[in-house]
Image (cartoon, rainbow, N blue to C red):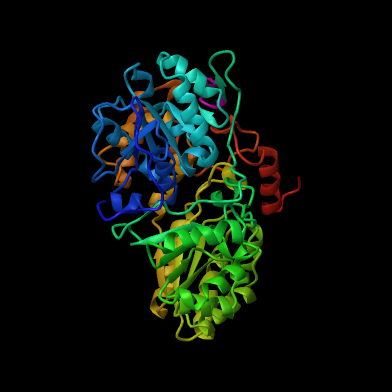
């Protein structure tokens, strides 16, 4: 921490400032690399009326003797149990219902909680749905305005702020069979639904702190785009963050880049599809200037169709070794199903241009277990990789592959995890590893647990609590689920494991997040799903 260079000026805390802790459910090295975490921390630290301290699983800033506000940034479903450990360390009751007037308000945000906060809802007093640029200032202002009121009254005041979800003011209603019928306000005057908030300003986020201790050492991260115009039917990063937003080059991106390059020579350009910024070629040309000699530039995933020899050349010149493209599948049919507007020829061209530009590696991302996928589609992925290796000798190929996991607010939210994915991961390993293609598969078993967390309602909260201490093993999660089902009965008992994880749901089903409005209504998502699966509307 003592090697940090701040790219903002913290405000000295005034007398009586709100004492806040902002936690991250991992180590400092990992947490400080999270751009979302950095931005929230910097936003709070620039307010004189907030005295904010950071907390990671392995270290933290000097602690407050007592805190008024405890926040958690969550970007990975499997980190849920860590939240409970962090709360206990701070001597905060883990269940929101057990907190009194002297306990801090516990709030959370990030993509996992914006998508479906319900499994973790009983642990949070407040969940912020959407973009922090809008939410945080309004949230803190409302907190300050009601600071002297009793806890229940403070929560009611917060519930009136757009995008601020107060779980205790909503209750799920189940049928005798255990089907979710609705999640409804518990009293008059509370909004029936809460809408995700969307930042539409001309600037996006960039690093607030540079440190050699980060997982990506001394990197200055600049968000080039937010969301993605491709709308792949499974993609949370695209659907949840709509609309696609791009800051202007002169007023947004260049000043953001310049700000960090006074402190480091390592630049990371971030976004779901950075090369789809309309001025990305101009940004690259600007970075091609001699004055950036010695600056190392890396980019996150790029759209294969936008790769050019010039892109490869400039990135290689600026220290990049490889390029990352998402292909989803080697099967043209599957790419059509998921709305991946990408031809095989464009994938071959991307590999060729990467090599011609001087890059030495190409990382491809794919998926198995997608709806309607057959073994032949997975064979097509293997064939494509083998053909790419033959067509571009000397280019190091890596395939990262995951199992499909349904995500809230996407067209495939109604689809289940397919057990066939497990053997299809093994099929790719059998075909590719002997040919010298590096395969980086994500665990099928952990995809199952991810789906459990992404698709459940509040009945999962006791399971998350029971999984503590054994949440790092698949068996621990399954054991906790079984134990809670045995201890509870009737509608309050968690549904069958198979039903939550593997079942394909009817589009008329009430979803756990139905009372939380994403960018697109459920009817539009259902239409996109029908289009994808080739069914008649």
Quarter of the image where the C terminus is located: top right
Relative to 92, 201 lies left or right: right
**Residue 76 visible to the viewer:** no
Residue drawn where x is 34% and y is 16% of the image: 100
Horizontal relation, residue 139 to residue 52: left or right: right
Residue at 50%, 23% in the rendered image: 158
* Magenta residues (range): 173-181
Could one spot residue 8 in this view of the protein? Answer: yes
Which residue is found at the position 52% from the left and 29% from the top? 164
Judge whether 15 appears above or below 25 on screen.
above
Instruction: Find residue 140 and report its horizontal and vertical position in percent.
Output: 46, 30
Front position in the image: 404 or 168: 168
Depth check: 149 or 9 in front? 9
Q: Residue 81: x, y in percent?
A: 33, 38
Q: How many marks?
A: 0
In the image, residue 9 lies in the stretch drawn in magenta = no
Apparent side of residue 14 relative to residue 158 in the rendered image (left or right): left
Residue 144 vertical position relative to residue 413 in the rendered view, above or below: above
């Amino acid at each position: 921490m003592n090697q940090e260079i701040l790219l903002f000026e913290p405000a000295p805390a005034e007398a009586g400032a709100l004492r806040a802790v902002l936690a991250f459910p991992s180590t400092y090295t990992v947490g400080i690399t999270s751009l979302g975490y950095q931005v929230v921390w910097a936003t709070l630290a620039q307010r004189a009326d907030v005295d904010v301290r950071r907390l990671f699983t392995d270290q933290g800033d000097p602690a407050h003797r007592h805190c008024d506000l405890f926040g958690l940034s969550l970007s990975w479903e499997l980190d849920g149990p860590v939240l409970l450990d962090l709360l206990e360390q701070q001597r905060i009751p883990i269940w929101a219902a057990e907190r009194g007037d002297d306990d801090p308000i516990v709030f959370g945000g990030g993509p996992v909680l914006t998508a479906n906060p319900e499994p973790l809802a009983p642990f949070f007093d407040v969940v912020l749905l959407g973009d922090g640029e809008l939410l945080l200032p309004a949230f803190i202002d409302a907190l300050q305005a009601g600071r002297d009121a009793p806890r229940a009254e403070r929560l009611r005041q917060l519930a009136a702020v757009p995008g601020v979800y107060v779980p205790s003011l909503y209750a799920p209603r189940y049928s005798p069979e255990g089907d979710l019928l609705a999640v409804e306000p518990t009293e008059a005057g509370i909004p029936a639904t809460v809408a995700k908030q969307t930042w539409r300003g001309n600037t996006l986020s960039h690093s607030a702190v540079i440190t050699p201790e980060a997982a990506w050492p001394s990197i200055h991260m600049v968000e080039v785009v937010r969301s993605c115009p491709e709308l792949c039917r499974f993609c949370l990063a695209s659907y949840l963050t709509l609309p696609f937003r791009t800051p202007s080059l002169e007023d947004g991106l260049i000043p953001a880049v310049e700000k960090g390059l006074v402190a480091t020579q390592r630049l990371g350009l971030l976004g779901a599809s950075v090369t789809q910024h309309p001025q990305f070629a101009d940004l690259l040309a600007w970075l091609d200037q001699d004055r950036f000699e010695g600056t190392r530039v890396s980019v996150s995933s790029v759209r294969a169709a936008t790769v050019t020899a010039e892109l490869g050349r400039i990135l290689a010149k600026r220290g990049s070794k490889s390029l990352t493209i998402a292909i989803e599948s080697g099967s043209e049919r599957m790419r059509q199903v998921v709305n991946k507007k990408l031809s095989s020829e464009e994938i071959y061209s991307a590999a060729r241009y990467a090599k011609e530009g001087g890059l030495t590696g190409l990382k491809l991302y794919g998926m198995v277990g997608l709806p309607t996928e057959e073994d032949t589609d997975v064979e097509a992925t293997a064939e494509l990789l083998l053909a790419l290796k033959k067509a571009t000798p000397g280019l190091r190929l890596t395939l990262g592959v995951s199992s499909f996991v349904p995500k809230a607010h996407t067209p495939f939210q109604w689809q289940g995890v397919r057990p066939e994915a497990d053997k299809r991961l093994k099929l790719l390993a059998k075909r590719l590893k002997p040919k010298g293609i590096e395969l980086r598969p994500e665990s099928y078993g952990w995809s199952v647990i991810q789906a459990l967390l992404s698709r459940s309602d509040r009945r999962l909260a006791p399971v998350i609590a029971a999984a503590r201490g054994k949440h790092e093993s698949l068996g621990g999660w399954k054991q906790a689920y079984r134990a809670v089902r045995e201890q509870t009965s009737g509608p309050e008992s968690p549904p069958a494991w198979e039903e939550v994880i593997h079942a394909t749901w009817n589009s008329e089903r009430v979803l756990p997040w139905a009372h939380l409005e994403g960018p697109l209504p459920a009817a539009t998502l259902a239409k996109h799903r029908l289009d994808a699966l080739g069914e008649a509307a």
